[in-house]
Image (spheres, grey):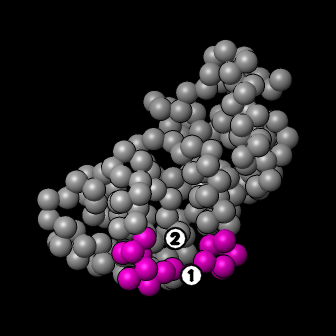
Amino acid sequence: MERERINELLAYGAVLWPRTFTLPADETRYSLTVQVWQDVLGDLDPTAIRAAMADWLGKFPPTPRELRQATIAISRLIAGDTPAPDVDEALAELERAVHLVGYMGRPGWSHPAITDAVRSVGGWADGICHTTNPAATRAHFITAYTAAVSRHRDHGSPAIPILAAATARAELDGPQRIHLEELGKGPS
């Protein structure tokens, strides 16, 4: 992927997470940031990356690795390659993440229905990791996950309309497009 596309993705991230996604002011660090994004995300479709960014619902922006995983998951979901795990597999994935990632981390899920269910029970740190009633949280997760799987099966991923809209926007060449010059970061 060319540098201009990476610059656009970084600008998109700055708009999505205005408080926590800061672009380095120092040109050397900014150039290094662009290089890391090219190395980690360069082989992926920029439109799918934007859809994954828009679909990432959390307090903090994803790392390039997390963004790569989310982009691949969305691409597979759109292609129909990723069926939702059954409830037992989703619970096992959740329990593994509690032990391996912990409340300070941000796990990547194998299917967006797990993300939706985690959000429904109060989020990763507060709802899952810091629960005071694990049995109730587990039951609530099962109910939320079952509903999320059904919703995804019936309506598709929330990323799919975002991906379609991003594809349409990518065709525009006018004031509708995000330009880095507007943010003070011109392409180098």
Apparent side of residue 87 relative to residue 53 in the rendered image (left or right): left
Element marked by disc 1:
loop
Residue contact between numbered discs 2 and 1, judged by CB atoms under 8 Å: yes
Q: Nearer the viewer, residue 137 or 56?
A: 137
**Residue 40 higher or lower than 25, as above or below:** below
Q: Where is residue 38 drawn, in percent x and y?
A: 77, 41
Residue lying furthest front = 100
Mark 1 Cα-neighbour bin, 10 Å: few <14, some 14–19, many ≥20: few
Tag on residue 83?
A: 1
Circle 2 sits on which residue?
Answer: 111
Element marked by disc 2:
loop
> In the rendered structure, which amino acid carries the disc numbered 2?
His
- Please name the residue shown 14% across and 65% down the image: 133
- Looking at the rendering, the stretch of residues picked out in magenta corresponds to 76-93
Q: Nearer the viewer, residue 83 or 19?
A: 83
Q: Where is residue 56 drawn, in percent x and y?
A: 51, 53
- Please name the residue shown 73% across and 33% down the image: 34
Residue lying furthest left = 132
Determine if residue 3 is in view.
yes
Determine if residue 51 is in view.
no
Q: CA distance from mark 2 to mark 1?
A: 8 Å
- Please name the residue shown 66% across and 36% down the image: 10
